[in-house]
Image (cartoon, helix red, strand yellow):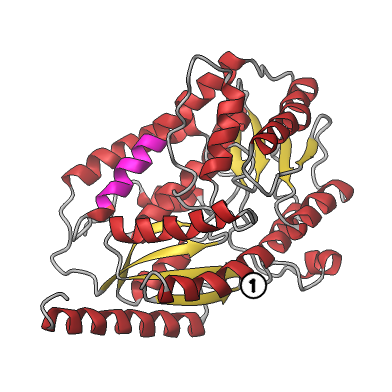
Amino acid sequence: MKDLKHLIYFEGLLDNADNELVEQAKKDGKLIMGYTCYHIPEVLLNVDNCVSVRLRAPRTGSIDISTYYMSNYVCEYARALLERAIEGGFQFLDGLAGVDACSMMNRFYEHFSILKCNTKENFFVTHLDVPYKTEEFSFNHMQRQLEVRLLDVMHDKLGVDISDAAIRKAVAEHNEVCKIIQEISEMRKADNPVITGYEFHVLNLVTYTCPKYLILPYLKETLAELKKRKPDEKLPRARVGIVGSEIDDPEFTKMVEAAGARVVFDRHCFGSIPGREVIELSDDEDALPQIVRHYMNTSECARYIADNKVLQRRETADRLAKEFKADGIIYEQMKYCDFWGFERALVSHIMAEEYGWPVLSIDRLYNAKGSGQLRTRFQAFVESLEIKKIHKAKKGGK
C-alpha cells in the first residue's frame, strides 16, 4: 500500500516526548501535564488550558543510572523513564500525575520527586491511590482521590479551571479524537484491511503523546485518506491480536507483522482498547463521577483482582478476537511486571484451553526491537496459524 501522507511526520513526533506539537502548545500558553497510566483519567489532564502527554522514553540507550537508584529487578519502562528524567528529558512538564498502579512505577514517581528532575517553580508530582475493585465505595474513593490529589492541586498550583463546564469541554474534545480512532480501528475488521497494525499503532500513540487540539487536523486528514485507500492484493498469512502490558513502541508491532501477520486489535496499556472509547456523559449528574465510573469500568488492567474484572479481561480478549476475525492472540508482558506476569502465565493457558484460541505467550525487555529470539517466535507462531488455516480449509471450514 502507498504510505500514508502523514506517517513519517507521526513517526517523528514519537521520537521525543517534547515533540514539535508539545513545543507549539507551550508557545500557545498551554500547561503540559505528564502521566503514565490509564488509571489517571486522561480527560482531567486536558481541562482549561492544560494538555496531557503520556510519558514514553523513545530511543532509550543505557539505563545504568536509573538502575543504580532502582535496581535491575524493576521493569525497564520505569527505569527508562527515570533515566530520561535524570537527563532532563521531562523538564518541559508543568505537572506529573501518578497512581499507585504498581510498586515499580511508584519508585519512578518517588525518585522523580526526590532527585528534582524538574526544576520549574510551580511544578508538582502528585500521587493517587487506586482501588482494586469496582464497587460503589471504590468509585467514591477514586473520585475523592481525583478531587483532592489532582484537580485541587492543579487549581492551587497552576490556577487551572476545574469546574464541571471545563471538564465537560475536555471530554468533548477527547471524544472527537476517540471517534476518529474508533472509525479507523473498525477498518481492521475487513478481510483485507486498508491499514496495517503498525500504522494504527503509530496513529493511536500520537493521540496519547501530542496535544489533541493540534493532532486532530492530521487525524481527520488521515481518516479521509484511508477511506480512499486501496489495500494490497496479497492477504496477510495470519491475523493476530495483542493483549498485554505497556507497549509504547510501534516497532514491536512492526516486528510481528514482519513475520507475515497483520495485527488487527490491540488490548494493551497504550492501545485503543481501553483508552479510545467515547465517554458518554449525562446532564443529570456532575461529569466527574461519570468519568470515574467510565475509566474504572473499562479498565482492563491486571491490577484489578476482583472476580468480575478477572473474567472481564478474558471475555474482552475473546470478544475482540472474534470481532476482528483473529486467528490467534499474542499475550505480552514487560519483563519484571508483576501484575501482567501473573496474568500472562495463567490466562494464556485459559484462553487456549477454555476459549480455544491459539496463543503465543512472551515476556520482553522495554527495548525489544532488536530481539532475534522474539522475531523467531513470531515467525514460528505465524507459521503455525497458517498451517491451522490450511488444515481447516481442507476440512471445509469445520
Q: How many marks?
A: 1
Picture coordinates of residue 284 (x, y %)? 51, 14
Q: Quadrant of the C terminus?
A: bottom left
Is residue 266 rendered to the left or right of residue 309?
left
Residue 276 lies in quadrant: top left
Q: Residues within 10 Å of mark 1 (few under 14, many from 20)?
A: some
Q: Is residue 313 above or below residue 391?
A: above
Q: Nearer the viewer, residue 181 or 281?
A: 281
Picture coordinates of residue 109 (x, y %)? 78, 49
Q: Any magenta on residue 7?
A: no
Q: Amino acid at mark 1?
A: Lys
Mark 1 residue element: loop
Does any portion of residue 23 appear in the rendered image? no
Q: Residue at horizontal 53%, vertical 20%?
A: 168
For the stretch drawn in magenta, the main secondary structure is helix
Residue 176 lies in quadrant: top left
Q: Residue at horizontal 55%, vertical 52%?
A: 308
Query: What is the magenta range?
Result: 178-187
Is residue 263 rendered to the left or right of residue 102?
left
Q: Any magenta on residue 180?
A: yes
Q: Is residue 287 above or below residue 61?
A: above
Picture coordinates of residue 294 (x, y %)? 53, 35
Does any portion of residue 293 appear in the rendered image? yes
Residue farthest toward the right in the current orientation of the protein: 114
Find disc 1 in the rendering and name its residue: 335
Residue 139 lies in quadrant: top right
